[in-house]
Structure formats: structure tokens, C-alpha cells
Image (tube, rainbow, N blue to C red):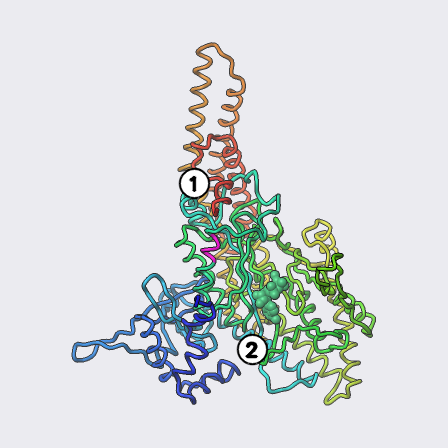
Amino acid sequence: MPHRASDSFGSLVFAGDVMLKRLPPDVFMNLQRTVKNGSPLDPAIANTVASAMKDWALEHGATHYCHWFQPLTGTTAEKHDAFLSTTSDGGAIEKFSGSQLIQGEPDASSFPNGGIRDTYEARGYTAWDATSPAFLYRSGAQTTLCIPTVFVSYTGEALDKKTPLLRSIQAVAKHAMRILKIFGADQGVNIITTLGVEQEYFLVDTELASQRPDLTICGRALVGAPAPKGQQLEDHYFGAIPQRVIEFMAEVEQRLFELGVPVKTRHNEVAPGQFEIAPTFENANVAVDHQMITMSVLKETAERHGFMCLLHEKPFAGVNGSGKHNNWSIATDTGINLLDPRDDTHTNMQFLTILCAVIRAVDTHAELLRGSIASAANDHRLGANEAPPAIMSIFLGDMLTDILDQLESGNPKKTMKGGALELGATTLPQLPKHTSDRNRTSPFAFTGNKFEFRAVGSSASVAWPNTVLNTIIADSLDFMATQLEKRAGKNPTQAKLESAVKSLLKEVVKEHRRVCFDGDGYSKAWHDEAKKRGLPNHTSTADAIACFGSKSATELFSRYGVLSKRELEARYGVMVEQYIKILRIESRTLQSMVRTAILPCATRFQAELADAVGATMACDIECPGTSALLREVVGQVEALRTAVAKLEKAEQFHGDHEKEARHYRDVLVPAMLDVRRLCDGLEKVMPADLYPLPTFAELLFSTR
Ligand code: ADP
Ligand code: MG
């Protein structure tokens, strides 16, 4: 019998059957209450769970355990401790206690903390998140038991991405529950947010990639002229997957299946060398952890297959960038999707209320949503080739737009139906036709029964965009619930409730539908129209993140218990700092590449040309073409020397971080582009054996 993927699914995860078999029934039930219903964790069960986890981990060859957490770096962190403990008689045994499972103590001052911890205030804690299952991570011959945890400071403030995410999910649950109550739904359920994240990435042959410091250090090409063939022929998207790549994908999938990550889809993306992997959606907290694991597995597995996996948002200028489509919805823990419009949508008042809450949230808090996906890397992608612009807008499609029109006139009466497609040959099936087309240009699109937030960057942790999204949704659900409670009164009749809903939705649609746009989001016309509608359009991170420093944001995040003033300030501080640091690293990498590789090679070329001109002149032969090229190269080399000196100067700035970020936006970023333009000009005329870097043509087609 061939091995089936389902046989090993979740084999490295302490959940489901493994837990059921290894825990006493009362402990199992107790833990399930926390995992499934969100009940408080009972510390009394920790010792039993820890002991079962340890036995299971040891049987799989694990030697160490670690608290696995997500600091503000945007990556994951782990400090390994051996199970091995010495005994008084000089021997050793493997030990793992309940308190070691529940709490850890990493150094808090060595992670970005936005001023919450000083270097001399090092104490921080990790705390077990029982709602995301522990797993065994294999790296070569090493197996480590990883326990998902939150990470907080000695003073209890969140220093990570998971804590606020969990709080934001709770905030959505609380206010969605009020809406459900108003509509008379079963009150025994728990509400969660659901999440399915599509990950785009590039693969480049390691041998070529490792010759480029920009790819190895920054994850993107800082210089490089476009390849003659990019994505013009549209022949890569969904094309046959090259054998080397599909073998890599299969190993990634196998490893992820074992880790319980339900990956489902794989395909070629638009740009040459670009691919995608997507899972089936899950509870958002677990989905976020699984997304972090997916990124690690992609990178590690790529190395074994001779590839470098680039998760950067824009590794190659001129072709598609990579995103991470964040498919999001709200559901009951019994599996009812609250964003399912159902058949007669115009009568589904609960759905329409939640839909309008989303529209209101995205319009009211467009800046926060934009800020949630801001990074120096995503700045290159947003608004460029086939990427949504920095303007936040919602695509609803024909059916919902029609219902919005009806809501605005006060009384929705019908739901558009999709019908069927006749394909013209009797042997072909009749296809049911959706009520709406798709819109790939929208940053926030309704796709049938969920929203797809497409502006998220490919290298980002999705924890923060979801935290922000949940918070603004909680605010809107709170608003809708409060309004309905006020307008309909206690125990309203069906008629009274319906009239309250219709009057509220009419107002909300009127006020907020300016954020809805179904047309071409890539077009200049939309940019002009959005400006007229007063929608914000921050193209640079330096501007986009400023909203997190505002009073209204502080008030919003603390009202819903997601982040205190200090916690939000800290995050804002870290974002500004990261923007500056990334640009500085890129600038220095570029300077070094130009000074130590591109300029010396260009100068050699210049000397070769000068020799050629000299030699021909000595024979009294005219060589106007070569002389012209020499003049051109000398001009470009001199201009490049000046540009790189200017870049070095642009880096220097004295002032606070916010000002420095704006200075980098206005001076450093353009200075890098100047240097790049000159390098790319030289690349086009220099002999292939003298140009010191593999070209885009070589890199983009290196996966075959
Ligand atoms: P599409 O064709 O719209 O891209 P897919 O069915 O391929 O839709 O799904 C894309 C992603 O959206 C997948 O990860 C999928 O599991 C996820 N998804 C589907 N339904 C939901 C939902 N209710 N909540 C969150 N994510 C969802
Ligand atoms: Mg999609």
C-alpha cells in the first residue's frame, strides 16, 4: 500500500488522538474545555499534561523542549532546554514539570520592546497557550518539543504578537455574541475568527542567489535590470510546475502534514520563479502559528533542494511582488460561518448587520488597516505590478452591491441569482454561475463567504494585521449591537427588530459605502476617485504607521482590551525603528556592493575600452562607436561614484526616530533608486563576464 498523506497527518502534534490516548479522561476533558470553549486554563492539570507530553516527545527522539513564541521581530523565538536532569547519585533522568510547561523566563530586554524593558530590566515570561497544540520540530537529526506560548514582560505587558491577537479574538467574540443574541441565536456557542493564509514566494537557485549579497542579506535584489522576458507572456501562472520545484513542494507538504498544517493548494504564480502554497482555513490563533511554521519549513526545505526561498514582498523590481492573502471570517465554534450570505441574503438580517459592521470598520479605520500591513518591504509592492494599491477599499460584487442599494433605499426585497452557464457543447456540463465576478485588484474583497485581505505582505507575520482587523471589527460590532439594543428595546417583536435593523443599516450604508469599490483598483481613475471620496492613500510606511501614534488609536485598542497605551506605544516605536533599520541595512548593502563589486568591474571595463580606443588610434583607425561607449561608461561610472557618496550621506541624520523615518522616505529611498538606475544602466552595457552579479534573466529562470 502506498503511503497516504492522511496516515501521517498531525503525527508530530500533541493534539486529538495523541492527547486522547495519553491523558486520563478527566484531564483530557478539562483541557478540551480551554481549547474548544475558551474556558480558563486549570493549572491543576499541568503536571499530568507535561508528563504525557514529555513521554510522547521522548518516544519521538526529542531531547529538548522550548517555549515557542512570537516577539516583535516578526519571526519566532525559541530557547531550548534539555529534558535531561541530573540526580543526586550522579545519574540523570528526563524531567518536565507542569510549571516548566506553563511558564518560562527568557530575557526580555534582548528583543525589540519599544522601551517597555530596559537592558538592565531583563526579566520576561512566556506562558503556555494551550489553545494551540504543542509540536515536535525536526531539524536534521534534532527533534525539539515546541510549546506555543505568549511572551510578556515582568510587568505583565505584552511583548509579542500572540497576546494581543488572542485578546482581539476575544473582543470580536464578545461583541459578535451580542449581535447573535439580538437575533435570537443559540447562546451556548463560542465565537472564533477563522483564517486561511495563501503564501506567495520565489525560488532561486542557491548557487546563483548566494553570489548576490542583496539577496542573502536583504532578501531582495537592490539592483538589476529587467530580464528581456518577465511575465509578459502570462505563461507561468498555473503553468506546469517544474520537476525540481514540485519535488521541493512535496517535501514541504509532507513536513507540514506531519506538523498538522492542513496545506491544500500549490501552484505557479504570475512571475517566473514565483509560486504559492495555501492551507485550509482554521481557528485564527492556530492558523497564525501554522503560518509561521509554514514560512520556516519553506525556507529550510528550499535549502535542501538547492533553492533559496525568498519571502520578500518585492524581490525583483518589474515583475509581480509576493503577498499573503489573509482570508478571514467569523464563525461559531460549532462551525457556522457568520459571513455566509445564504440563499435569500436580503432576508438574512444577521449577516447584513455583520457585513455592514465590516464596511463601517474598514471605512472608519482605513488608516489602521493600512498601517497594519505597512513595512519597508511592502512599500515596494503596494501599487506596483499586480498588487493592490495602498488605498483601502472593499470589493463586494454584484449581488451584495445590489443589496446595499436596496438597504440604502430602506427595504431590501430580492437577492440576485447566479443562474447557469451553457458551454455550447452538449457533452460539457452546465456550470452554476456565481452572482459575482472576482476582483484581484481589491485590497479587501468579499469572496463568497469570507473577506480576503490581499494587501498583507508575504514576509509579514499575519498576527498583527489580524489583531488590527479584529479590533476595528469589534468596535463596529459593538456600535451595531449598541444601536440595535437602543433602537429595538428589550425583547422586541420581530417587526420592531426588523425596522430597527433596516433604519440602522440604511444609515451605515449611506455613511460608509464610499469605501466600497468594485472597479479596477490598479487604475489611475480609482486613485483620483478615491481622493475625491476622501479615502486615505499612504504610499510610504513612514506615513502609514503614524496612525498608531494617535490618541484615537490608543483609545480604541485600550477600549477593547487589546493593547494598553504603553503596549501600543511600544509597537509603534518598534515599527518606526524597524523601518529605519531595514532601510539602513539595504543602503549599506547597496553601498558595499557598488564600491566593492560593481564600480571595480565597471572601472576594469572602462580601462579595457580605453585600451581598445588607444590601440586603434595608434593604428590611425577611427573608432567612433567604441569612443562613444567609453564616454558613456566613464560618465556612468563617475555619476555612480557621486551617487553612492550621496547615498552614504543620506544615511546620516540627527533627530528623533519619526523625523528620521521621514528623512529616509524623502532622501534615502530616492538616493538608493538613483544608485540603482546607474547600476542597471551599466549592467546593460557591460560584458557578461565582467558584470559581477547574476542577472534577473539568470535568477528568475533558475528553477528549471
Ligand atoms: P478563493 O478561490 O476565494 O481563493 P479558496 O477556497 O481557494 O478561495 O480559499 C482561499 C483560502 O481561503 C483558503 O485558505 C481557504 O481555506 C480560506 N477560506 C475559505 N473559507 C474560509 C473562511 N470561512 N474563513 C477563513 N478562511 C477561509
Ligand atoms: Mg485567493
Q: Where does label 2 land, which residue?
A: 170
Q: Is residue 585 visible?
A: yes
- Left-right relation of 488 to 110: right
Quarter residue 227 falls in = top right
Classified by dominant secondary structure, the portion drawn in magenta counts as helix
In this view, which residue lies farthest toward the left? 89
Residue at disc 1, secondary structure: helix
Q: Check the image and report above or below for 286 versus 697.
A: below
Q: Is residue 247 magenta?
A: yes
Relative to residue 331, is residue 483 drawn left or right? Answer: right
Q: Tags 2 and 1 in contact by the CB under 8 Å rule?
A: no
Name which residue type carries label 1.
Met
Magenta region, residue range: 245-249
Q: Earlier in the sequence, mark 2 or mark 1?
A: 2
Nearer to us in this view, 471 or 198: 198
Q: Is residue 50 above or below residue 378?
A: below
In the displayed orientation, state which residue is furthest to the top: 620
Q: Residue at x 59, y 71 (%)?
A: 470
Q: Position of residue 112 (x, y in %)?
A: 43, 62
Badge 2 amino acid:
Gln
- Return the x and y of residue 240 as percentages of the image width and height: 55, 51
Residue ID for mark 1 = 593
